[in-house]
Amino acid sequence: MYLSEIKMILTKIDEVVFALQNGDLVPPHFHVTEVGSVQKHFIDCGGTVRHENVINFQLFTATDYDHRLSTKKLLSIIELSEEKLGLENHEIEVEYQGDTIGKYGLDFKEGIFILTSTLTDCLAKDKCGIPQEKPRVRLSTLQSEESTCKPGLGCC
């Protein structure tokens, strides 16, 4: 989800609810303790220099159980961040504390912001020799070892 999308959604909903993909809700007394612009300048394993920009939201829950972040308050936090940090319309990542700090993507379904799983990936598969897809092999097309491997051929 991009910054422009969350801003539009916040003008159309009555409450801010976050959930993990497994359906567990982020406690309703959460805070958005940070909104940041994160730039990543790196080189991949194939030698290509890359730049990534995301907007980071950090969710935090404390013991102030009566706290509720309104849609208007979250929108004002975002707008202040845009003004002070010069945020552009980048994709949003969310940090949320589980066993450790997790980084999530963000989606919106049925009135709830969903923290989506993120994955690592090789960005230079063509240079690393990583196949795009595992080749599918039918067992019936493989010859048995008995018919192809004989002593002295170096395959046994």
Image: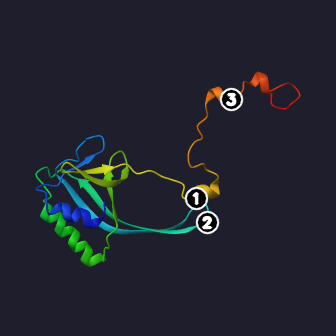
Label located before the other in sequence (2 or 3) = 2
Q: Residue furthest top?
A: 146
The quarter of the displayed image where residue 87 is located: bottom left
Report helix, strand or loop for mark 2.
Answer: loop
Q: Nearer the viewer, mark 1 or mark 2?
A: 1
Residue 93 lies, with reference to residue 89, above or below; the image says above
Query: Left or right of 50: which side holds 15?
Result: left
Residue drawn at x 23%, y 62% as measured from the top left? 6
> In x, y percent, where is residue 139?
63, 28
Q: Which residue is mark 1?
A: 124
Marks 2 and 1: in contact by CB < 8 Å? yes
* Label 2 neighbour load within 10 Å: few <14, some 14-19, many 20+: few
The amino acid sitting under disc 2 is Gly
Quadrant location of the N terminus in the rendered image: bottom left
* Label 3 neighbour load within 10 Å: few <14, some 14-19, many 20+: few
Q: Which residue is mark 3?
A: 142
The amino acid sitting under disc 3 is Leu
Query: Left or right of 101: which side holds 121?
Result: right
Q: Residue furthest front?
A: 141
> In x, y percent, where is residue 100?
37, 48
> In x, y percent, where is residue 110?
19, 48
